[in-house]
Amino acid sequence: MNHPNEPTEPTNPASSTTAWEEAMSRDFDARVRHLHEAPLDFDSVKGKAHKIKRNRRAAVAGSILGVAAIVTPIAVLSSGGDNESKEPPFVQDPTPSETIADPTSAEPDYVLDGVWHQADGDEVDLPESDQPYQSAVVWNGNLVATRWDGEVYSITDVIDDEGKVVDSFDTASSPAVNEAGTTIAWIDTDGSVMTAWGSGEDDQLPIGSVDLAAPGETVAYFTAAITGGPDCLDNDESPACVVYLNSGLGEESRRIDSLGIDEVVAPAVTKVFDATDDGVVSVINEVTDDLDTCGGPFDLIDGTLRWKTCDYQVQQISPDGSHVAAPQSQYDGLGPTSLSVLDAQSGEQTGVYGAEGGFIHTWAWTTDGQLLFDVYDGANWHLVSMAVDGSLTEIGDPVKGADVDNPFTLIQH
């Protein structure tokens, strides 16, 4: 399944010629020209923030988005800049989502303050890094964590269960991992689409290539998901692998398999979020005149959507395939203000969380089927786990910080 790259103190928002605005504008303009792409992704531009002082995000995003009129207004943070601790802003749910659930048998896994919190409850100290890890997956018991390289591409570190970096490689985007956690896929900086199921040369296979050239501060393709494995060699004992790629230019998403077959996922599909070994892919395949993104679970065998919605973006599929994570259909670069769990067969909402006065930044399914996400309330960051019925559990204590200084790295499964 899937793997869908922090500013410091802002500068004067009256200036429209800062380096940050230029980088933001280039990325945004590319998306305006190709409206099939999902709304502006904060992660795609935030890496530059470690080098450049920012304008206040609300002012910058407001000036850019107001001209383009493409996404919903930025969330108004109610704290007014104070640092007073706040409780997570739970909202009423059709299910009893305000009930704080008992902890489940498995622990949520994530990275916080240089510590890898594992699903079995162990904690592993990670090596120091110049850049924070922005995404992570678990592969054969190792943490595969990706950080920005300071320019355009990224560096991925493979870290064992003792916190030692056992390998590092350059990538054009974050690696994706298959359902079993045995095989990863990534795009090398030369455009090679790579797969690996071990550390040896015989345990890696390039299955195709893409042209990464793109205008501005982006690349032409990003790794979205991989299915198959455990190895990607074509024989009677092991299934082939399929790697799904999204376009940074708003073009149709592609699938490349280990036979070298390169084709679009399906007509009009412009974003893949996740994929399962039984042939279900969560996609966007339409953008309305009001710029809502529409899609759902696409069945590759039948060639049809299981169901379609323009109310949500149907994104990560739960480990057992029964539910999907779904933010609202349209949101700005900071993140959505609501996150739902939908039944994967019917599309019915079974749980929802709303971030009043703040926003949700990232989310990922845990190994035991909880939807883990981090949320900013205007003064503090919270880590929250939501069961498929909407029950909520806050993990640990709130972490004080600014809206652009998310302390958590969630692990995709």
Image: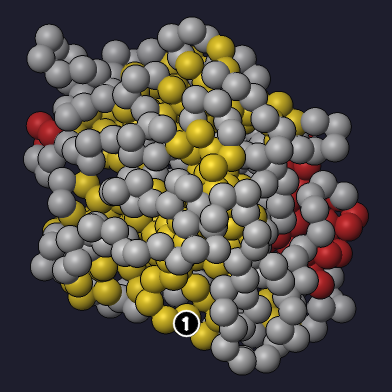
Q: Name the one closer to the observer, 297 or 249.
A: 297
Q: Name the one closer to the observer, 360 or 370.
A: 370
Tally of numbered discs: 1
Residue in the picture at 33% in, 68% down: 111
Is residue 74 among what the camera can see? Answer: yes
Quadrant housing the C terminus? top left
Name the side, left or right, on which 222 lies relative to 61.
left
Q: Position of residue 153 (x, y in %)?
A: 45, 53
Residue in the picture at 81% in, 59% down: 73
381, above or below 238, in the image: below
Q: Name the one closer to the observer, 336 or 144.
A: 336
Quadrant housing the N terminus? top left
Q: Position of residue 129 (x, y in %)?
A: 32, 74
Task: Give amino acid for label 1.
Answer: Val
Residue in the picture at 30% in, 76% down: 114
Furthest residue toward right: 67
Residue in the picture at 21% in, 17% down: 239
Name the side, left or right, on which 274 lies relative to 166.
right
Is residue 252 among what the camera can see? Answer: no
Q: Which residue is mark 1?
A: 399
Which of the 4 image quadrants contains residue 347? Answer: top right
SS state under label 1: strand
206, above or below 103, in the image: above
**Colouring rule applied to residues:** secondary structure
